[in-house]
């Protein structure tokens, strides 16, 4: 009995080769662009949509944190939790420096939204660190 050709057989897609690394872009500049301008590393590497989403969302989180009376913590090595919060704030890049220069981020501990503001500010900086790691993977051709 001869087999009939099946019309339901679909051609399997060929396995995609890993993307070539972005050799023309030095990693240090990708890191610096990604840190200073949230999403800048993705924009530098040509991932425009992701870069623009990060460029809008992370500074928005940072501004919401300031609006909720959050505090930009000073770096004090004697108090480890405050030092860690300071490093997380610093991770936001340019929005951090702009807020510092304009005198924002003093925080108001008696405000009912103070802790929420701190959470937004710290999370914005930590998310920016994760976004830089993502840009690193893209630059090396892993994504």
Image (cartoon, rainbow, N blue to C red):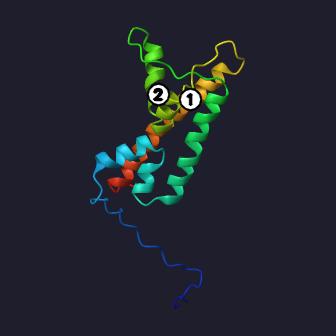
Q: Residues within 10 Å of mark 2 (few under 14, many from 20)?
A: many
Query: Whole-Å distance between the Cαs marked 2 and 1?
Result: 8 Å
Quarter of the image with the C terminus is: bottom left
Judging depth in this view, the residue of 44 and 136 nearest the camera is 44
Q: Residue furthest right?
A: 112
16 w.r.t. 120: above or below = below
CB atoms of marks 2 and 1 within 8 Å: yes
Horizontal arrangement in the rendering, residue 47 relative to residue 115 (left or right): left
Residue sitting at 39 percent across and 57 percent down?
Answer: 45
Q: Could you say which disc has been placed on residue 88 in the image?
A: 2
The quadrant in which residue 142 appears is: bottom left
Residue sitting at 55 percent across and 80 percent down?
Answer: 9
32 w.r.t. 66: above or below = below
- Residue 35 percent coordinates (x, y): 41, 41
Horizontal arrangement in the rendering, residue 114 relative to residue 128 (left or right): right
Judging depth in this view, the residue of 136 and 75 nearest the camera is 75
Provide the residue designation for mark 1.
Answer: 121
Q: Secondary structure at mark 2?
A: helix
Please tell me which of labels 2 and 1 falls first in the chain: 2
Q: Could you say which disc has been placed on residue 70 in the image?
A: none
51 w.r.t. 132: above or below = below
- Residue 89 percent coordinates (x, y): 49, 28
């Amino acid at each position: 009995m001869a087999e009939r050709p099946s019309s339901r057989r679909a051609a399997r897609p060929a396995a995609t080769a890993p993307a070539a690394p972005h050799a023309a872009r030095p990693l240090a500049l990708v890191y610096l662009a990604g840190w200073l301008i949230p999403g800048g590393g993705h924009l530098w590497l040509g991932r425009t949509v992701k870069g623009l989403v990060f460029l809008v969302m992370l500074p928005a989180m940072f501004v919401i944190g300031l609006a909720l009376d959050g505090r930009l913590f000073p770096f004090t090595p004697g108090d480890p939790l405050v030092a860690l919060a300071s490093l997380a704030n610093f991770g936001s890049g340019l929005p951090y420096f702009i807020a510092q220069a304009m005198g924002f981020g003093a925080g108001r501990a008696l405000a009912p939204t103070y802790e929420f503001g701190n959470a937004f500010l710290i999370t914005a900086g930590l998310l920016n660190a994760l976004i830089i790691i993502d840009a690193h993977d893209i630059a090396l051709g892993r994504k």
